[in-house]
Image: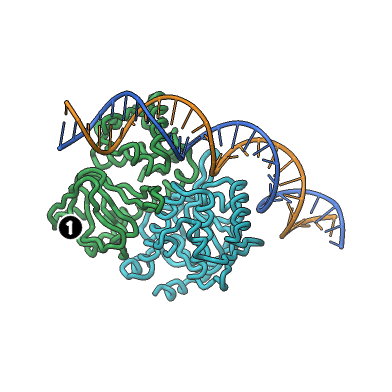
Chain colours: A green, B cyan, C orange, D blue
Amino acid sequence: MLSQVAQDRSPVHFRMHQFLARENEKPEAMLHLQEGWACRYRLLPDGRRQITGLYLPGDYCDPQWALGGLPSQPIVAITNVRALQLPCRASHAGLDGHHGFGQALSDVIERQANWLVTLGRKTAMERVAHLLVELFERMRKAGLAYGQQCAMPLTQIEIADMTGLTPVHVNRTLQSMRAKGLVELQSKWLRIPELQALREVGALTPQEAAA
Amino acid sequence: MLSQVAQDRSPVHFRMHQFLARENEKPEAMLHLQEGWACRYRLLPDGRRQITGLYLPGDYCDPQWALGGLPSQPIVAITNVRALQLPCRASHAGLDGHHGFGQALSDVIERQANWLVTLGRKTAMERVAHLLVELFERMRKAGLAYGQQCAMPLTQIEIADMTGLTPVHVNRTLQSMRAKGLVELQSKWLRIPELQALREVGALTPQEAAA
DNA sequence: CGCAATTTTGAGCCCTTTCAAGAGGAGTGG
DNA sequence: CCACTCCTCTTGAAAGGGCTCAAAATTGCG
Protein backbone atom coordinates (compact mmCIF):
# COMPACT_ATOMS: atom_id res chain seq x y z
CA MET A 1 0.00 0.00 0.00
CA LEU A 2 0.98 3.58 -0.50
CA SER A 3 -0.59 5.30 2.44
CA GLN A 4 2.69 5.30 4.33
CA VAL A 5 4.46 6.79 1.37
CA ALA A 6 1.83 9.50 1.12
CA GLN A 7 2.16 10.33 4.74
CA ASP A 8 5.84 11.00 4.30
CA ARG A 9 4.83 14.50 3.28
CA SER A 10 2.85 17.22 4.93
CA PRO A 11 -0.53 18.23 3.50
CA VAL A 12 -0.94 21.05 0.99
CA HIS A 13 -4.03 23.14 0.40
CA PHE A 14 -5.53 24.71 -2.70
CA ARG A 15 -8.33 27.22 -2.93
CA MET A 16 -11.25 26.80 -5.29
CA HIS A 17 -10.15 27.73 -8.87
CA GLN A 18 -6.48 27.48 -7.95
CA PHE A 19 -4.20 25.44 -10.20
CA LEU A 20 -2.84 22.13 -9.01
CA ALA A 21 -0.79 21.91 -12.19
CA ARG A 22 -0.22 23.99 -15.29
CA GLU A 23 0.44 23.02 -18.86
CA ASN A 24 4.04 22.09 -19.56
CA GLU A 25 5.18 22.85 -16.03
CA LYS A 26 6.97 20.11 -14.17
CA PRO A 27 4.75 19.28 -11.19
CA GLU A 28 6.23 19.62 -7.72
CA ALA A 29 4.97 16.26 -6.63
CA MET A 30 2.16 13.87 -7.10
CA LEU A 31 -0.88 14.65 -4.97
CA HIS A 32 -3.01 12.24 -3.00
CA LEU A 33 -6.32 14.03 -2.56
CA GLN A 34 -7.69 13.94 0.96
CA GLU A 35 -10.57 16.34 0.55
CA GLY A 36 -12.17 18.32 -2.28
CA TRP A 37 -12.52 17.88 -6.03
CA ALA A 38 -10.34 18.90 -8.97
CA CYS A 39 -10.40 18.50 -12.74
CA ARG A 40 -8.15 18.35 -15.75
CA TYR A 41 -9.34 20.17 -18.88
CA ARG A 42 -8.47 21.73 -22.20
CA LEU A 43 -9.52 25.14 -23.43
CA LEU A 44 -9.86 25.82 -27.16
CA PRO A 45 -8.89 29.23 -28.53
CA ASP A 46 -12.52 30.24 -29.02
CA GLY A 47 -13.44 29.47 -25.42
CA ARG A 48 -14.91 26.00 -25.75
CA ARG A 49 -13.83 23.93 -22.77
CA GLN A 50 -13.78 20.18 -22.23
CA ILE A 51 -13.06 18.58 -18.90
CA THR A 52 -11.03 15.41 -19.48
CA GLY A 53 -10.68 14.09 -15.98
CA LEU A 54 -12.08 14.43 -12.48
CA TYR A 55 -10.12 13.95 -9.27
CA LEU A 56 -12.05 12.97 -6.15
CA PRO A 57 -10.89 12.33 -2.60
CA GLY A 58 -8.62 9.30 -2.55
CA ASP A 59 -7.48 9.82 -6.13
CA TYR A 60 -3.91 10.37 -7.20
CA CYS A 61 -3.23 13.49 -9.19
CA ASP A 62 -1.88 12.62 -11.52
CA PRO A 63 -0.88 8.93 -11.82
CA GLN A 64 0.60 9.41 -15.26
CA TRP A 65 3.21 11.79 -13.89
CA ALA A 66 4.91 8.64 -12.66
CA LEU A 67 5.56 7.80 -16.31
CA GLY A 68 7.49 10.98 -16.91
CA GLY A 69 6.75 13.82 -19.28
CA LEU A 70 5.06 17.13 -18.60
CA PRO A 71 1.34 17.67 -17.98
CA SER A 72 -0.30 18.58 -21.29
CA GLN A 73 -3.43 19.92 -19.62
CA PRO A 74 -3.94 22.14 -16.60
CA ILE A 75 -5.53 20.83 -13.41
CA VAL A 76 -7.65 23.15 -11.34
CA ALA A 77 -9.40 22.86 -8.00
CA ILE A 78 -13.19 22.71 -8.26
CA THR A 79 -13.60 23.14 -4.51
CA ASN A 80 -11.05 23.82 -1.82
CA VAL A 81 -8.63 20.91 -1.80
CA ARG A 82 -6.45 19.25 0.81
CA ALA A 83 -3.87 16.77 -0.40
CA LEU A 84 -0.71 14.95 0.55
CA GLN A 85 2.37 15.27 -1.60
CA LEU A 86 4.57 12.43 -2.67
CA PRO A 87 7.52 12.50 -5.05
CA CYS A 88 6.73 11.38 -8.58
CA ARG A 89 9.75 9.10 -8.43
CA ALA A 90 8.44 7.15 -5.45
CA SER A 91 5.56 6.05 -7.59
CA HIS A 92 7.65 3.57 -9.50
CA ALA A 93 7.61 1.37 -6.45
CA GLY A 94 3.88 1.01 -6.89
CA LEU A 95 3.84 0.29 -10.60
CA ASP A 96 4.61 -3.38 -10.26
CA GLY A 97 2.04 -4.35 -7.69
CA HIS A 98 -1.55 -5.06 -8.44
CA HIS A 99 -2.52 -2.15 -6.22
CA GLY A 100 -1.25 1.39 -6.17
CA PHE A 101 -0.27 3.36 -9.24
CA GLY A 102 -0.63 0.54 -11.70
CA GLN A 103 -4.26 0.25 -10.67
CA ALA A 104 -4.66 4.02 -10.72
CA LEU A 105 -3.29 4.18 -14.25
CA SER A 106 -5.58 1.37 -15.34
CA ASP A 107 -8.54 3.21 -13.89
CA VAL A 108 -7.68 6.42 -15.72
CA ILE A 109 -7.42 4.66 -19.07
CA GLU A 110 -10.60 2.71 -18.44
CA ARG A 111 -12.59 5.77 -17.43
CA GLN A 112 -11.33 7.79 -20.35
CA ALA A 113 -12.35 5.01 -22.74
CA ASN A 114 -15.81 4.96 -21.19
CA TRP A 115 -16.14 8.69 -21.68
CA LEU A 116 -15.06 8.41 -25.30
CA VAL A 117 -18.08 6.18 -25.82
CA THR A 118 -20.37 8.57 -24.00
CA LEU A 119 -19.15 11.73 -25.73
CA GLY A 120 -19.07 10.05 -29.12
CA ARG A 121 -22.35 8.22 -29.12
CA LYS A 122 -24.72 9.08 -26.31
CA THR A 123 -27.64 11.49 -25.93
CA ALA A 124 -27.73 14.33 -23.45
CA MET A 125 -29.68 12.39 -20.85
CA GLU A 126 -27.42 9.37 -21.20
CA ARG A 127 -24.37 11.59 -20.73
CA VAL A 128 -25.65 13.25 -17.58
CA ALA A 129 -26.79 9.90 -16.19
CA HIS A 130 -23.34 8.43 -16.83
CA LEU A 131 -21.71 11.32 -15.00
CA LEU A 132 -23.97 11.13 -11.98
CA VAL A 133 -23.64 7.37 -11.68
CA GLU A 134 -19.88 7.55 -11.97
CA LEU A 135 -19.63 10.30 -9.37
CA PHE A 136 -21.84 8.47 -6.93
CA GLU A 137 -20.03 5.17 -7.32
CA ARG A 138 -16.62 6.75 -6.98
CA MET A 139 -17.74 8.64 -3.89
CA ARG A 140 -19.16 5.44 -2.47
CA LYS A 141 -15.86 3.64 -3.02
CA ALA A 142 -14.11 6.49 -1.26
CA GLY A 143 -16.42 5.99 1.69
CA LEU A 144 -18.07 9.34 1.08
CA ALA A 145 -21.57 8.22 0.16
CA TYR A 146 -24.29 8.08 2.78
CA GLY A 147 -27.04 5.73 1.76
CA GLN A 148 -28.30 6.92 -1.61
CA GLN A 149 -26.62 10.29 -1.49
CA CYS A 150 -23.30 12.04 -1.73
CA ALA A 151 -21.81 15.50 -2.14
CA MET A 152 -21.91 16.93 -5.65
CA PRO A 153 -20.09 20.27 -5.86
CA LEU A 154 -20.18 20.60 -9.67
CA THR A 155 -22.11 23.52 -11.13
CA GLN A 156 -24.27 22.95 -14.19
CA ILE A 157 -21.61 24.77 -16.17
CA GLU A 158 -19.03 22.22 -15.06
CA ILE A 159 -21.41 19.38 -15.82
CA ALA A 160 -21.74 20.87 -19.28
CA ASP A 161 -17.96 21.02 -19.75
CA MET A 162 -17.71 17.41 -18.66
CA THR A 163 -20.55 16.06 -20.81
CA GLY A 164 -19.87 18.14 -23.91
CA LEU A 165 -23.22 19.94 -23.69
CA THR A 166 -24.25 23.56 -23.17
CA PRO A 167 -25.20 24.72 -19.69
CA VAL A 168 -28.70 25.52 -20.89
CA HIS A 169 -29.22 22.02 -22.17
CA VAL A 170 -27.78 20.48 -19.03
CA ASN A 171 -30.35 22.44 -17.08
CA ARG A 172 -33.23 21.19 -19.16
CA THR A 173 -31.90 17.65 -19.05
CA LEU A 174 -31.61 17.68 -15.28
CA GLN A 175 -35.16 18.99 -14.98
CA SER A 176 -36.36 16.18 -17.15
CA MET A 177 -34.49 13.66 -15.00
CA ARG A 178 -35.90 15.16 -11.83
CA ALA A 179 -39.40 15.02 -13.29
CA LYS A 180 -38.91 11.31 -13.93
CA GLY A 181 -37.73 10.78 -10.37
CA LEU A 182 -34.32 9.59 -11.51
CA VAL A 183 -32.27 11.99 -9.42
CA GLU A 184 -32.57 14.57 -6.71
CA LEU A 185 -29.96 17.26 -7.06
CA GLN A 186 -29.97 20.46 -5.07
CA SER A 187 -27.62 22.63 -3.11
CA LYS A 188 -24.58 20.59 -4.06
CA TRP A 189 -26.09 17.34 -2.87
CA LEU A 190 -26.97 14.34 -5.02
CA ARG A 191 -29.45 11.60 -4.27
CA ILE A 192 -30.11 8.65 -6.56
CA PRO A 193 -33.31 6.83 -5.59
CA GLU A 194 -32.63 3.82 -7.83
CA LEU A 195 -29.05 3.45 -8.92
CA GLN A 196 -29.81 0.60 -11.30
CA ALA A 197 -32.50 2.63 -13.05
CA LEU A 198 -30.08 5.51 -13.56
CA ARG A 199 -27.42 3.13 -14.84
CA GLU A 200 -29.87 1.95 -17.48
CA VAL A 201 -30.80 5.49 -18.45
CA GLY A 202 -27.09 6.12 -18.90
CA ALA A 203 -26.78 3.10 -21.21
CA LEU A 204 -23.95 1.90 -19.02
CA THR A 205 -22.61 -1.55 -19.72
CA PRO A 206 -21.94 -3.82 -16.73
CA GLN A 207 -18.21 -3.11 -16.76
CA GLU A 208 -18.67 0.63 -16.99
CA ALA A 209 -18.41 2.86 -13.99
CA ALA A 210 -17.38 -0.22 -12.10
CA ALA A 211 -13.84 1.07 -12.10
CA MET B 1 14.91 -0.80 -26.15
CA LEU B 2 12.37 -3.53 -26.56
CA SER B 3 12.88 -4.70 -30.08
CA GLN B 4 15.01 -7.61 -28.91
CA VAL B 5 12.32 -8.66 -26.48
CA ALA B 6 9.73 -8.54 -29.21
CA GLN B 7 11.84 -10.65 -31.47
CA ASP B 8 11.96 -13.37 -28.86
CA ARG B 9 8.66 -14.56 -30.29
CA SER B 10 7.56 -15.61 -33.70
CA PRO B 11 5.10 -13.49 -35.67
CA VAL B 12 1.35 -14.07 -35.57
CA HIS B 13 -1.19 -13.14 -38.23
CA PHE B 14 -4.77 -11.97 -38.08
CA ARG B 15 -7.26 -11.64 -40.90
CA MET B 16 -9.32 -8.52 -41.42
CA HIS B 17 -12.23 -8.48 -38.91
CA GLN B 18 -10.56 -11.10 -36.74
CA PHE B 19 -10.30 -10.45 -33.00
CA LEU B 20 -6.94 -9.67 -31.46
CA ALA B 21 -8.59 -9.67 -28.04
CA ARG B 22 -12.06 -10.21 -26.62
CA GLU B 23 -13.81 -8.64 -23.68
CA ASN B 24 -12.85 -10.16 -20.34
CA GLU B 25 -10.58 -12.75 -21.89
CA LYS B 26 -7.03 -12.90 -20.66
CA PRO B 27 -4.87 -12.02 -23.66
CA GLU B 28 -2.27 -14.55 -24.78
CA ALA B 29 0.44 -11.97 -25.02
CA MET B 30 1.05 -8.38 -25.84
CA LEU B 31 1.35 -7.70 -29.56
CA HIS B 32 3.84 -5.48 -31.31
CA LEU B 33 2.22 -4.62 -34.61
CA GLN B 34 4.47 -5.00 -37.61
CA GLU B 35 1.92 -4.49 -40.35
CA GLY B 36 -1.77 -3.61 -40.58
CA TRP B 37 -4.24 -1.66 -38.46
CA ALA B 38 -6.51 -2.64 -35.58
CA CYS B 39 -8.94 -0.88 -33.25
CA ARG B 40 -10.48 -1.13 -29.81
CA TYR B 41 -14.20 -0.31 -29.53
CA ARG B 42 -17.38 -0.61 -27.55
CA LEU B 43 -20.77 -1.63 -28.89
CA LEU B 44 -23.94 -0.41 -27.20
CA PRO B 45 -26.95 -2.73 -27.02
CA ASP B 46 -28.82 -0.78 -29.72
CA GLY B 47 -25.95 -1.04 -32.18
CA ARG B 48 -24.21 2.28 -31.68
CA ARG B 49 -20.47 1.77 -31.88
CA GLN B 50 -17.60 3.94 -30.73
CA ILE B 51 -13.99 3.19 -31.55
CA THR B 52 -11.84 4.11 -28.55
CA GLY B 53 -8.40 3.37 -29.84
CA LEU B 54 -6.45 2.74 -33.03
CA TYR B 55 -3.38 0.52 -33.35
CA LEU B 56 -0.98 1.24 -36.17
CA PRO B 57 2.27 -0.49 -37.19
CA GLY B 58 4.83 -0.05 -34.43
CA ASP B 59 2.18 0.24 -31.72
CA TYR B 60 1.91 -2.09 -28.75
CA CYS B 61 -1.42 -3.77 -28.30
CA ASP B 62 -2.23 -3.22 -25.62
CA PRO B 63 0.23 -1.38 -23.33
CA GLN B 64 -2.20 -1.36 -20.41
CA TRP B 65 -2.19 -5.15 -20.29
CA ALA B 66 1.17 -4.70 -18.59
CA LEU B 67 -0.74 -3.21 -15.67
CA GLY B 68 -2.83 -6.30 -15.16
CA GLY B 69 -6.57 -6.74 -15.38
CA LEU B 70 -8.66 -7.99 -18.26
CA PRO B 71 -9.43 -6.13 -21.50
CA SER B 72 -12.76 -4.35 -21.07
CA GLN B 73 -13.19 -3.78 -24.78
CA PRO B 74 -12.62 -6.03 -27.78
CA ILE B 75 -9.85 -5.35 -30.28
CA VAL B 76 -10.39 -6.24 -33.89
CA ALA B 77 -8.22 -6.18 -37.01
CA ILE B 78 -9.19 -3.47 -39.51
CA THR B 79 -6.88 -4.92 -42.15
CA ASN B 80 -4.83 -8.07 -42.18
CA VAL B 81 -2.33 -7.81 -39.35
CA ARG B 82 1.13 -9.19 -38.71
CA ALA B 83 2.50 -8.85 -35.19
CA LEU B 84 5.12 -10.13 -32.79
CA GLN B 85 4.08 -11.57 -29.45
CA LEU B 86 5.71 -10.76 -26.17
CA PRO B 87 4.68 -11.83 -22.70
CA CYS B 88 2.69 -9.23 -20.74
CA ARG B 89 5.02 -9.79 -17.81
CA ALA B 90 8.12 -8.80 -19.73
CA SER B 91 6.66 -5.36 -20.08
CA HIS B 92 7.42 -4.40 -16.52
CA ALA B 93 11.01 -4.10 -17.49
CA GLY B 94 10.08 -1.23 -19.76
CA LEU B 95 7.88 0.68 -17.35
CA ASP B 96 10.72 2.48 -15.65
CA GLY B 97 12.55 3.83 -18.63
CA HIS B 98 11.60 6.92 -20.53
CA HIS B 99 11.11 4.75 -23.60
CA GLY B 100 9.17 1.56 -24.00
CA PHE B 101 5.90 0.82 -22.26
CA GLY B 102 5.93 3.81 -19.99
CA GLN B 103 6.02 6.01 -23.06
CA ALA B 104 3.39 3.86 -24.77
CA LEU B 105 1.08 4.21 -21.77
CA SER B 106 1.63 7.95 -21.70
CA ASP B 107 0.78 8.17 -25.37
CA VAL B 108 -2.45 6.23 -24.92
CA ILE B 109 -3.62 8.49 -22.09
CA GLU B 110 -2.61 11.61 -23.98
CA ARG B 111 -4.37 10.56 -27.17
CA GLN B 112 -7.51 9.56 -25.32
CA ALA B 113 -7.60 12.95 -23.58
CA ASN B 114 -7.25 14.68 -26.94
CA TRP B 115 -10.15 12.68 -28.31
CA LEU B 116 -12.30 13.53 -25.31
CA VAL B 117 -11.89 17.17 -26.30
CA THR B 118 -12.70 16.45 -29.93
CA LEU B 119 -15.75 14.28 -29.26
CA GLY B 120 -17.04 16.60 -26.57
CA ARG B 121 -16.55 19.98 -28.20
CA LYS B 122 -15.68 19.89 -31.88
CA THR B 123 -17.67 20.12 -35.11
CA ALA B 124 -17.82 17.41 -37.73
CA MET B 125 -15.11 18.96 -39.88
CA GLU B 126 -12.84 19.53 -36.90
CA ARG B 127 -13.28 15.91 -35.86
CA VAL B 128 -12.43 14.48 -39.25
CA ALA B 129 -9.48 16.85 -39.60
CA HIS B 130 -8.17 15.74 -36.19
CA LEU B 131 -8.41 12.11 -37.22
CA LEU B 132 -6.64 12.55 -40.53
CA VAL B 133 -3.87 14.66 -39.02
CA GLU B 134 -3.31 12.14 -36.25
CA LEU B 135 -3.25 9.23 -38.64
CA PHE B 136 -0.79 10.93 -40.95
CA GLU B 137 1.53 12.01 -38.16
CA ARG B 138 1.51 8.59 -36.55
CA MET B 139 2.20 6.93 -39.86
CA ARG B 140 5.02 9.38 -40.50
CA LYS B 141 6.56 8.57 -37.12
CA ALA B 142 6.33 4.90 -38.00
CA GLY B 143 8.24 5.62 -41.20
CA LEU B 144 5.21 4.79 -43.31
CA ALA B 145 4.50 8.18 -44.83
CA TYR B 146 5.83 9.07 -48.24
CA GLY B 147 6.04 12.81 -48.68
CA GLN B 148 2.58 14.16 -48.07
CA GLN B 149 0.80 10.83 -48.23
CA CYS B 150 0.23 7.60 -46.40
CA ALA B 151 -2.02 4.54 -46.45
CA MET B 152 -5.49 5.05 -44.99
CA PRO B 153 -7.43 1.77 -44.88
CA LEU B 154 -10.39 3.07 -42.83
CA THR B 155 -13.81 3.03 -44.47
CA GLN B 156 -16.09 6.00 -43.99
CA ILE B 157 -18.11 3.86 -41.62
CA GLU B 158 -15.04 3.34 -39.46
CA ILE B 159 -14.24 7.05 -39.62
CA ALA B 160 -17.79 7.63 -38.39
CA ASP B 161 -17.36 5.20 -35.49
CA MET B 162 -14.13 6.95 -34.56
CA THR B 163 -15.42 10.53 -34.80
CA GLY B 164 -18.86 9.92 -33.30
CA LEU B 165 -20.65 10.92 -36.51
CA THR B 166 -22.93 9.09 -38.93
CA PRO B 167 -21.42 7.62 -42.09
CA VAL B 168 -23.61 9.89 -44.19
CA HIS B 169 -22.31 12.98 -42.50
CA VAL B 170 -18.72 11.79 -42.71
CA ASN B 171 -19.23 11.47 -46.43
CA ARG B 172 -20.55 15.00 -46.79
CA THR B 173 -17.82 16.35 -44.54
CA LEU B 174 -15.08 14.67 -46.57
CA GLN B 175 -16.54 16.05 -49.77
CA SER B 176 -16.50 19.51 -48.30
CA MET B 177 -12.88 19.07 -47.24
CA ARG B 178 -11.93 17.81 -50.68
CA ALA B 179 -13.67 20.78 -52.27
CA LYS B 180 -11.57 23.09 -50.11
CA GLY B 181 -8.41 21.29 -51.16
CA LEU B 182 -7.66 20.24 -47.59
CA VAL B 183 -7.29 16.53 -48.28
CA GLU B 184 -7.13 14.02 -51.07
CA LEU B 185 -8.56 10.71 -50.05
CA GLN B 186 -9.23 7.89 -52.46
CA SER B 187 -8.75 4.17 -52.78
CA LYS B 188 -7.39 3.84 -49.25
CA TRP B 189 -4.73 6.48 -49.78
CA LEU B 190 -4.49 9.81 -47.98
CA ARG B 191 -2.70 12.94 -49.15
CA ILE B 192 -2.54 16.15 -47.14
CA PRO B 193 -1.37 19.07 -49.29
CA GLU B 194 -0.82 21.41 -46.33
CA LEU B 195 -0.55 19.71 -42.99
CA GLN B 196 -0.53 22.96 -41.04
CA ALA B 197 -3.74 24.11 -42.71
CA LEU B 198 -5.46 20.86 -41.80
CA ARG B 199 -4.18 21.11 -38.23
CA GLU B 200 -5.85 24.50 -37.97
CA VAL B 201 -9.09 23.22 -39.44
CA GLY B 202 -8.99 20.52 -36.77
CA ALA B 203 -8.57 23.15 -34.03
CA LEU B 204 -5.56 21.19 -32.84
CA THR B 205 -3.46 22.79 -30.15
CA PRO B 206 0.32 22.64 -30.57
CA GLN B 207 0.69 19.73 -28.16
CA GLU B 208 -2.06 17.73 -29.79
CA ALA B 209 -1.36 14.96 -32.22
CA ALA B 210 2.29 15.53 -31.43
CA ALA B 211 2.26 12.36 -29.38
C1' DC C 1 -28.57 44.04 2.15
C1' DG C 2 -26.50 43.99 -2.41
C1' DC C 3 -23.59 42.11 -5.78
C1' DA C 4 -22.06 38.18 -8.53
C1' DA C 5 -22.66 33.75 -10.00
C1' DT C 6 -25.78 30.21 -11.04
C1' DT C 7 -30.09 28.42 -12.48
C1' DT C 8 -34.18 28.80 -15.16
C1' DT C 9 -37.26 29.94 -19.06
C1' DG C 10 -38.54 31.17 -23.96
C1' DA C 11 -38.11 31.27 -28.88
C1' DG C 12 -35.93 30.34 -33.14
C1' DC C 13 -32.29 28.32 -35.70
C1' DC C 14 -28.88 25.03 -37.42
C1' DC C 15 -25.95 21.14 -37.58
C1' DT C 16 -26.35 16.55 -37.67
C1' DT C 17 -29.34 12.59 -38.03
C1' DT C 18 -32.65 9.67 -40.17
C1' DC C 19 -34.70 7.41 -43.92
C1' DA C 20 -34.47 6.05 -48.60
C1' DA C 21 -32.60 4.87 -52.79
C1' DG C 22 -29.18 4.67 -56.36
C1' DA C 23 -24.32 4.21 -58.10
C1' DG C 24 -19.85 2.42 -57.84
C1' DG C 25 -16.37 -1.34 -56.80
C1' DA C 26 -14.35 -5.53 -55.44
C1' DG C 27 -14.45 -10.38 -54.93
C1' DT C 28 -16.62 -14.99 -56.12
C1' DG C 29 -18.19 -18.60 -58.83
C1' DG C 30 -19.79 -20.39 -63.02
C1' DC D 1 -14.86 -13.26 -68.89
C1' DC D 2 -19.21 -12.24 -67.23
C1' DA D 3 -22.93 -12.34 -63.86
C1' DC D 4 -23.94 -11.90 -59.23
C1' DT D 5 -23.63 -10.26 -54.67
C1' DC D 6 -22.16 -7.66 -50.90
C1' DC D 7 -20.24 -3.65 -49.22
C1' DT D 8 -19.09 1.05 -49.58
C1' DC D 9 -19.90 5.48 -51.24
C1' DT D 10 -23.04 9.06 -52.77
C1' DT D 11 -27.14 11.99 -53.04
C1' DG D 12 -31.78 14.00 -51.61
C1' DA D 13 -35.29 15.46 -48.52
C1' DA D 14 -37.20 16.01 -44.08
C1' DA D 15 -37.02 15.78 -39.01
C1' DG D 16 -34.98 16.54 -34.59
C1' DG D 17 -31.92 17.16 -30.72
C1' DG D 18 -29.14 20.39 -29.04
C1' DC D 19 -27.44 25.22 -29.63
C1' DT D 20 -27.70 30.30 -29.52
C1' DC D 21 -29.31 34.46 -27.86
C1' DA D 22 -31.62 36.95 -24.37
C1' DA D 23 -33.47 37.96 -20.12
C1' DA D 24 -35.55 36.91 -15.69
C1' DA D 25 -35.49 34.41 -11.27
C1' DT D 26 -32.83 32.38 -7.70
C1' DT D 27 -29.05 31.38 -4.83
C1' DG D 28 -24.89 32.18 -2.36
C1' DC D 29 -22.02 35.13 -0.02
C1' DG D 30 -19.38 39.21 1.87
Residue B22 in view here: no
Residue under the image location 35 percent in, 69 percent down? B94
> To which quarter of the image does residue A93 belong?
bottom left
| Residue displayed at 61% across by 53% down | B176
- Element under label 1? helix
Residue at left 52%, top 52%? B162
Q: Position of residue B10 (x, y in %)?
A: 51, 71
Q: Say how many tags the image has.
A: 1
Up-down relation of residue A169 to residue B35 (above or below): above
Q: Which residue is drawn at 57% across and 65% down?
A: B192
Query: Measured along the vertical axis of the image, is residue A189 above or below residue B94?
Result: above
Q: Position of residue B164 (x, y in %)?
A: 52, 47
Depth check, front residue: B163 or B36:
B163
Compared across the picture, whether B57 is left or right of A39 comes to right
Name the residue type under label 1.
Answer: Val
Residue under circle 1?
A: A5
Q: Camera-side residue: A78 or B45?
A: A78
Q: Which sits in the foreground, A169 or A123?
A: A169
Image coordinates of residue B115 in percent, x first then y, are 44, 53
